[in-house]
Amino acid sequence: MAAEGTAPVYEARYGMDRRNVGVLAVSALFTVILVLGDFTPVQRVLGLVLFGGGGVLMAFTAMSRRVAFRVDGTGVLLGGSPARHLATTAHVPWEDITAVVLWQQHSAEGIPWVGVARRPDAGPLPGPGQGRAARATMRALAPGVPADVALASRAVSGWHLDRDALAAAVAYFAPGVQVVDAG
């Protein structure tokens, strides 16, 4: 929350959450089993790369404390993947935004996402994953969510979304932009 007289900038950073702790614990357990167990060298190497490497990458993500999502006077910053943060971060100015959209990926875990609906004539977002193949993938992963919104979204994973603080920042910086919960 912002101090009195200051703008309520909303910023979420990557860090540890319950999902990360669980995945790290499973990765560590499988890594120990692979090191101590009776496995072929190929199984051991592949498993260590998958579980050990994946665990290290997840720990790096959490410890990076990079910006995952930000709302301020200039617009919305969709933070990128910590492994390729600069290449996958996108800034969307308020003049291109028609709504901030909260939605949930239909999967076993029901991962929450937050993104922006943009004007139809807004240019493409910078970075990879904005072409036809990405649109087709997002239509499959997020049925019912427009592909443009899905492509301008970030999974709420490895960081916490405070809906009230988000709504307050959007109302302050862009009073005409609604925060829509698309379920």
Image (cartoon, helix red, strand yellow):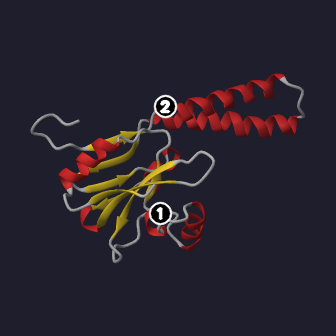
Q: Evaluate if marks 2 and 1 touch, with contact meaning CB atoms under 8 Å apart.
A: no
- Residue 76: image location, x then y, percent: 31, 55
Mark 2 crowdedness (10 Å alpha carbons): few <14, some 14-19, many ≥20: some
What is the three-letter code of the residue carrying label 1?
A: Leu
Residue at (86% x, 39% y) in the render: 42
Report x, y in % for residue 59: 55, 32
Q: Amino acid at mark 2?
A: Met
Q: As drawn, which residue projects farthest toward the bottom? A: 121
What residue did someone put label 2 on? 16
Secondary-structure class at tag 2: loop
Checking the image for residue 115, the label placed there is none
Report the residue at 23% width, 35% height from top: 1
The answer to whether residue 160 is above or below residue 114 is: above
Q: Position of residue 174 (x, y in %)?
A: 21, 58
Residues at marks 2 and 1, CA–CA distance in whole angstroms: 25 Å
Which residue shows up at 29% across the image and 50% down it? 71
Q: Image check: 29 left or right of 138?
A: right
As helix, strand or loop, the secondary structure at mark 1 comes to: helix
User: Residue 101 placed where, x, y %?
Assistant: 38, 58
| Depth check, front residue: 146 or 144 | 144
Dot 1 corresponds to which residue?
Answer: 151
Left or right: 139, with 6 as reference point: right
Residue at (11, 35) in percent of width and height: 4
